[in-house]
Image: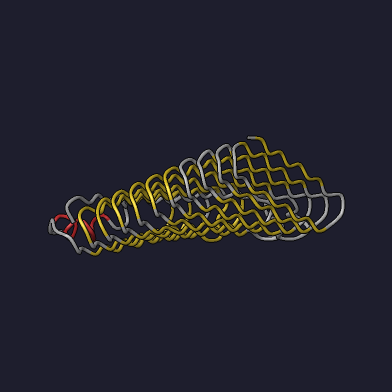
Amino acid sequence: MDMMKLFSTPLFALLAASTLAAPAFAGNQLTIAQVGQSNTATAEQQFDGNNDAISQNGHSNSAELDTNGYRNTGSVAQLGDGNTAVYKVVGSDNTGVINQGNSTGATASLSMTGQHHNANINQTGNQNSADVSISGENNSVMVSQNQPLTAKGNVLLANIDGTSQSVNITQTGANEATLNVGGGSNAINIQQFNGGSFATRNVADVTSMGTGNKVDVGQNGESNMATVLQQASSSNAAIRQNGIGNSATINQYGTGQAASITQNGNGNAVTVTQRN
């Protein structure tokens, strides 16, 4: 690997020799395992065909993985509270995974630039947040946020720019998802599920500024709210809500728009606006 920085007090002495001796060509493999508290790990992938894995078990851990090249694979796994994971991808055909389990207040940040990338973020716990930024074309992102029945909500913020991007979001509990979509022919799918009697309100807010974008929102639970704003032609929006006290709003501006809202429950509210 051409460039690699590892900062971990428990593991530094063991990894320093292999780090300095790493050859500067493609196809390197690196595994970092940290057990304890307040650890930090940083790895950089250069060139093609590298495979990096960071595993942290403890509290307040920090991991950053930077990938620049072609067909690289990277993963970050964190177990504990207050963890931070940052994954940056530049190039094409790269694959990355962030797993954060049993966490409270964990943060995951994913930045993708280029084409044909695949990335997954999986968070389990309370008050976790995910920040996703995508630019380029034909990239795919899947985000899963799952919390216990008595947990406070998780938050997702995504900025999507480019063409033919695919974003799939699944949230269970009292969650919030905010997406800003630019570019054309992107597909956004948000599915939010009620986690129990203590997690009764999901919020989905999508703003789409490009042509031919498709937005699909499904909410299953009580007191859910979904809002979709599309400001370009040939866009499609669908909202499905199953529960009590749901609210759905679709505002579309341009030609060739399509809107669909389905609600099953009591006390629901619908607003649809379409203007050329």
At a point 40% along the width and 46% down the height, the residue shown is 111
> How many numbered markers are drawn?
0
Q: Is residue 122 left or right of residue 239?
A: left
Please give the name of the residue rendered at 39% of the width and 44% of the height, measured from the top-left corner. 135
Question: Measured from the top left, where is residue 220 in percent x and y?
Answer: 72, 59
- From this view, report whether residue 179 is shown above or below residue 190: above
Colouring method of the image = secondary structure
Quadrant housing the N terminus: bottom left
Spot occupied by residue 182 in the image (x, y as percentages of width and height): 48, 40
Nearest to the observer: residue 262 or residue 81? 262
Q: Quadrant of residue 97?
A: bottom left
Q: Position of residue 62 (x, y in %)?
A: 41, 49
- Residue 207 against residue 267 in the figure, above or below: above
Query: Looking at this view, is 98 or 212 the one in front?
Result: 212
Of 208 and 18, nearer the camera is 208
Q: Quadrant of the C terminus?
A: top right
The answer to whether 188 appears left or right of 16 in the picture is: right
Tell me residue 213's x, y (percent). 53, 48
